[in-house]
């Protein structure tokens, strides 16, 4: 079963990649150049894959135009990455120079706007008001979330609830939306589309939690280890350890968090402190909880190899190293 | 007739302003603060007005929700202004500090994204695929235009055709879209909505041409006189004079255009040179041509005071001083 799911996922990713290569982003070489640089920089195509698998779980013989539709979520995702990089002043993205480092902030902002507009144009070509509604609702939640995240920057008082709100808007809603749009395109059964929506939301929560965990524990992400901490960004491992830490350790964590230049030894120390309070295990545990909720939603779907592939994705997410 | 039209326009603008004040941009005070700063900075509400008048020209008893709908064009417009200011590094906007000068580039980019998303959410709530299609097509053309404009920056070889392409995307398509959406909301007659679309497009072309002319000739715009020229921006008055100028004058215009620090005397000199080649009259003439085309489209509509008000707007545009 597991091997079958893996094969099926590989096949779908190949089709998604093929479609991405055929589809022209724009008629203008410069827009294509910048877009392709970010579109082909090792993205895992999680969002298009969720959209395709959700659609096929409800209708295995769905029109092949689903591949093109699924890509609107990659365009939306990449558009937010471009603006994020400008806002964060990022130097690198996925182990390569950030686009803003090659073409400047101006072009990066505007190509981000273009990709966003392109995604919405693709969505509107479906002429389905329900699809349009969930997509515009999602982009509104996301953009509001981006502003709130900027205001929360360096906020060491961030609670677990605040954190969930941030990652809900940053990651979960787009994954939920990708699933729901796939479902709406495939079937008019609103129970199924709601189940797939909630599956995607919970999967997205877990995805971001694991992403934030890997920032401390994995050297395979293409990001610098401890990048978030070095930037003073408060994520779940820090929140969970601050909750339990005694006054002295709490002070030390907060002090290191505010320190501008963190060296290897400082980072080792923070990992020691977080380990002392089992922050990494507890973070993984929270991720698992969201994955359980996601899988509960999946149970409501009719049996199919695509449903199994979605289960596989959910489990895989907890084991991923990058 | 003229006085009636003016009264009618004043009344509609008051309703648009009232609706704008009632409508909450977001639940978040910070997003509201930044948005309201740009939304209430002396904008002329041209786009919402075009939308309302177009709708009422086809159905004078239209639902009062047209006022709320019309505002999506103000939101879209302001979103582009916010991103423009970041891209241009603008210090001022409409005689006041630019938003980026008060809240920084990061917040300005993200609130721009938010307003854009908000506008599209408002559009999708109408659940009308034709409306959604023209709006997403328009935002795509606009964002593509923004990138092209960035690439053309400081391009002294810009032809009259290139210039029209730039202002078509920068200004005309959104005004055309505002008219068309008003028309589509009011009536299923696609001849009328196409006429109003082309009316808006041509009006938009004239609007931008006059705007670029006023940059040389008016002290009432709230902008520095000659701002475009000082930034090396090539607009129609320069293009038309370069076309006719002898080698010596051409060299001087190009030299002044590339000069970083333009003083009052330099600007007087450039105005002399442009006057020598009747660039201002000729620019006004081009504006008049587009207004004629716009009015031809209007002729196709059934008679109504709202149609007359649109004629009035077209004529007024040529006489405006700011």
Image (spheres, coloured by chain):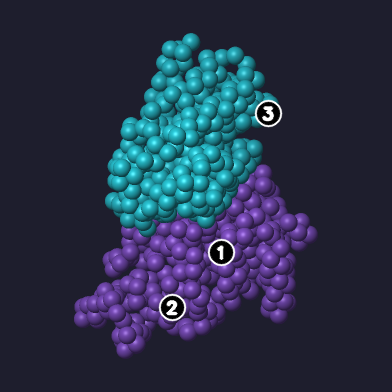
Chain colours: A cyan, B purple
Query: What separation in Å lies between label 1 and label 3 (alpha carbons)?
Result: 38 Å
- Residue farthest toward the right in the current orientation of the protein: B61
Which residue is under mark 3? Answer: A190
Residue A142: where, in percent of width, then height? 54, 46
Q: Are marks 2 and 3 in contact (CB under 8 Å)?
A: no
Q: Mark 2 points at which residue?
A: B215
Give residue A31's position: percent from left, percent from top: 36, 48
Q: Which of pointers 1 and 2 indicates the residue nearer the eye?
A: 1
Residue drawn 43% across the image and 72% down it:
B91
Crowd band around label 2 with a 10 angstrom C-alpha radius: few (<14), some (14–19), many (20+): many
| Subunit of label 1 | B
Give SS at disc 1: helix
Report which quarter residue B305 is drawn in.
bottom right
> Of circles 1 and 3, which is in front?
1
In the foreground, B91 or A124: B91
On residue B34, the disc is 1
Q: Is mark 2 on a helix, strand or loop?
A: helix
Asked whether the viewer can see residue A294, the reply is no
Q: Which of marks 1 and 2 is nearer the N terminus?
A: 1
Horizontal side of A235 relative to B187 (left or right) equals left
Q: Residue at x 39, y 79 (%)?
A: B226
Taking the image as shown, residue A223 lies to the left or right of residue A317, namely left
Disc marking residue B251 = none
């Amino acid at each position: 079963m597991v091997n079958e799911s893996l094969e099926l996922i590989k096949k779908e990713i190949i089709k998604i990649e093929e479609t991405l290569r055929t589809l022209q982003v724009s008629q203008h070489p410069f827009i294509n150049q910048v877009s392709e640089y970010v579109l082909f920089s090792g993205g895992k195509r999680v969002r298009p894959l969720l959209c395709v698998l959700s659609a096929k779980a409800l209708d295995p013989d769905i029109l092949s135009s689903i591949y093109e539709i699924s890509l609107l979520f990659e365009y939306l995702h990449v558009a937010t990455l471009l603006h994020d990089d400008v806002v964060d002043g990022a130097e690198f993205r996925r182990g390569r120079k950030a686009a803003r480092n090659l073409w400047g902030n101006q072009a990066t902002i505007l190509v981000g706007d273009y990709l966003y507009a392109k995604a919405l144009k693709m969505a509107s070509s479906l002429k389905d008001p329900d699809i349009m509604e969930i997509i515009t609702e999602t982009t509104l939640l996301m953009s509001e979330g981006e502003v709130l995240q900027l205001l929360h920057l360096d906020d060491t008082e961030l609670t677990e609830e605040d954190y969930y709100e941030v990652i809900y808007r940053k990651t979960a809603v787009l994954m939920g939306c990708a699933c729901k749009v796939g479902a709406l395109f495939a079937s008019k059964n609103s129970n199924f589309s709601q189940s797939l929506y909630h599956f995607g939301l919970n999967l997205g929560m877990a995805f971001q939690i694991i992403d934030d965990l890997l920032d401390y524990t994995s050297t395979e992400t293409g990001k610098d280890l401890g990048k978030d901490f070095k930037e003073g960004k408060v994520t779940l491992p820090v929140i969970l350890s601050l909750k339990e830490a005694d006054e002295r350790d709490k002070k030390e964590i907060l002090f290191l968090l505010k320190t501008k230049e963190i060296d290897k030894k400082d980072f080792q120390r923070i990992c020691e402190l977080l380990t002392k309070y089992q922050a990494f295990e507890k973070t993984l545990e929270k991720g698992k909880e969201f994955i359980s909720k996601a899988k509960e939603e999946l149970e409501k779907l009719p049996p199919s190899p695509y449903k199994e592939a979605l289960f596989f994705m959910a489990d895989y997410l907890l084991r991923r190293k990058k």
